[in-house]
Image: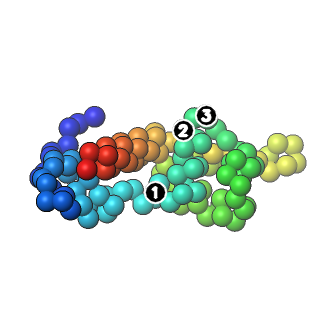
């Protein structure tokens, strides 16, 4: 991972500390990936990161969400290119399966690195 440029930041107590540019006050939240940052979408991407594929029913049960809620969030991830959706049938029963794309994995890794930087900066304060 590339090193982030440090900037001087004055804390509430008047001390100056070096914070990675990615966690500048005010800019940190703005640079978060809003597609992944939403709770249900983060849960979907995280579940798919540790599973090769998951069915709609498996994700629904794991996340404890409704059909409609899961559909809306999965579609948003699919539109962003983070998730791939394959629809088919198992016998006469419809089957929807989701997989994390390479872009989705990269976006999740970037998101997690950003959150880790925020946590480190917060603990140093």
Residue at 20%, 38% (x, y): give it. 3
Residue at 41%, 44% (x, y): give it. 112
Q: Which residue is mark 1?
A: 37
Front label number (1 vs 3): 1
Q: Position of residue 10 (x, y in %)?
A: 14, 58
10 Å neighbourhood of mark 3: few (<14), some, or many (≥20)? few
Q: Position of residue 91 (x, y in %)?
A: 87, 43
10 Å neighbourhood of mark 2: few (<14), some, or many (≥20)? some
Q: Which residue is mark 2?
A: 49
Secondary structure at badge 2 equals helix
| Quarter of the image where one finds residue 24 | bottom left
Q: Disc 1 versus disc 2: distance between alpha carbons?
A: 15 Å
Q: Disc 3 versus disc 2: distance between alpha carbons?
A: 7 Å
User: Left or right of 123: which side holds 80?
Assistant: right
Secondary structure at badge 3 equals loop
Q: Disc 1 versus disc 3: distance between alpha carbons?
A: 22 Å
Labels 1 and 2 touching (C-beta < 8 A):
no
Q: Position of residue 26 (x, y in %)?
A: 26, 64
User: Left or right of 25: which side holds 46?
Assistant: right
Labels 1 and 3 touching (C-beta < 8 A):
no
User: Left or right of 47: which side holds 32?
Assistant: left
Q: Out of 118 and 60, give the one closest to the viewer.
A: 118
Q: Please state, as top left, top right, bottom left or bottom right, where the N terminus lies in the image.
A: top left
- Dot label at residue 52: 3
Residue at 41%, 41% (x, y): give it. 109
Q: Out of 118 and 114, give the one closest to the viewer.
A: 118
10 Å neighbourhood of mark 1: few (<14), some, or many (≥20)? some
Q: Position of residue 117 (x, y in %)?
A: 31, 45
Residue at 36%, 56% (x, y): give it. 32
Q: Out of 18 and 54, give the one closest to the viewer.
A: 18
């Amino acid at each position: 991972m590339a090193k982030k440029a440090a900037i001087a930041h004055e804390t509430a107590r008047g001390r100056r500390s070096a914070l990675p540019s990615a966690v500048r006050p005010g800019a940190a939240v703005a640079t978060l990936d809003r597609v992944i940052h939403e709770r249900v979408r983060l849960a979907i991407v995280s579940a798919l990161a540790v599973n090769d594929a998951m069915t709609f029913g498996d994700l629904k049960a794991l996340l404890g969400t409704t059909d409609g809620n899961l559909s809306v969030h999965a579609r948003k991830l699919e539109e962003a290119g983070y998730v791939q959706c394959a629809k088919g049938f198992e016998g006469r029963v419809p089957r929807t399966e989701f997989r994390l794309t390479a872009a989705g994995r990269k976006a999740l890794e970037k998101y997690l690195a950003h959150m880790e930087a925020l946590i480190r900066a917060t603990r140093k304060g």
